[in-house]
Amino acid sequence: MISLAVAQRYAKALVEVAFEENIEHKVTEDLRTYEEIFHAVPGLLDTLHNPAVTRTAKERLLHEIMARYPVDGITSNFLRVLLRHNRIRFFTSICEAYEKLVSERKGMMHARVTTAEPLSETEVLRLAEKLGTVTGKQVKIDLETDSEILGGVIVQMGSTVYDGSVRTRLTEMRRLLAES
C-alpha cells in the first residue's frame, strides 16, 4: 500500500512538470524506453536499489545507461531523483500511475478488456466507441485474453468491473439452481 502512495506522489509530481513544459508525450516515451531497459536487463533495478551497492556506483551505472539511451532533461532528472531518494524500486508503479494521470488529464480513460479469444481491430474500435459513449471520455483499451472465462467479455474501468463472461453466468446459474 505504501508503494502505491509513493508511486502516486512521484507520478503526480512528474505529470505536473511534464504538462507545465508541454512534454508529457516525450516523457511518456522516455519512461516506456526505460521500462523496456529495466525489463530487458534482469537484476538492473535490483542493483540500482541494492543497499550494498554504493550510491556512487549506482549513479555511475545510471549515467552510463542514460549516455547510451538519452532522454529528455526532465526524465533524466526524475530518474536521478528516484535513485537519490531510494525510490527507483517503484519505477514500474510510477510509470503506470504517470500514464493513468496523463490520460485522465487529457480526458481519456483506460479500460482493461478480457475476452476468451482475441478481438479484431474492428471489434476493439466498436467497443472503445461504445465505452466512450457510456463514459463521455475517449477510451483506450488494454486487451487481455483468458480462455478460462469461456466466452463473453469482462471490462474493468477504474474500480468498476462489468462482467459479461460465460463463466460468471454459469456460476450464477449454478448458484441459483443450488438454492432452489
Image (cartoon, rainbow, N blue to C red):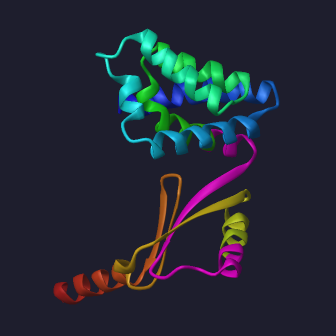
Q: Residue furthest right?
A: 22
Tell whether 50 sits left or right of 8.
left
The number of discs equals 0
Quadrant location of residue 45? top left
- Asked whether residue 113 is drawn in magenta, I would say yes
- Quadrant holding the N terminus: top left
| Residue shown at the point (53%, 25%) measured from the top left | 9
| Residue shown at the point (63%, 39%) measured from the top left | 101
Q: Answer above or below: position of 8 versus 176.
A: above
Tell whether 116 sits left or right of 51.
right
Quadrant location of residue 24? top right
Q: Answer above or below: position of 45 versus 13.
A: below
> Measured from the top left, where is residue 163 in percent x and y?
45, 72
> Measured from the top left, where is residue 87 in percent x and y?
44, 22
Q: Answer above or below: position of 38 versus 145.
A: above
First to last magenta residue range:
100-126
Q: Nearer the viewer, residue 174 or 45?
A: 45
- Asked whether residue 26 is drawn in magenta, I would say no
| Residue shown at the point (69%, 30%) measured from the top left | 71
Q: Nearer the viewer, residue 131 or 5?
A: 5
> Measured from the top left, where is residue 128 in percent x and y?
68, 69
- Quadrant holding the C terminus: bottom left
> Measured from the top left, where is residue 121 in percent x and y?
68, 77
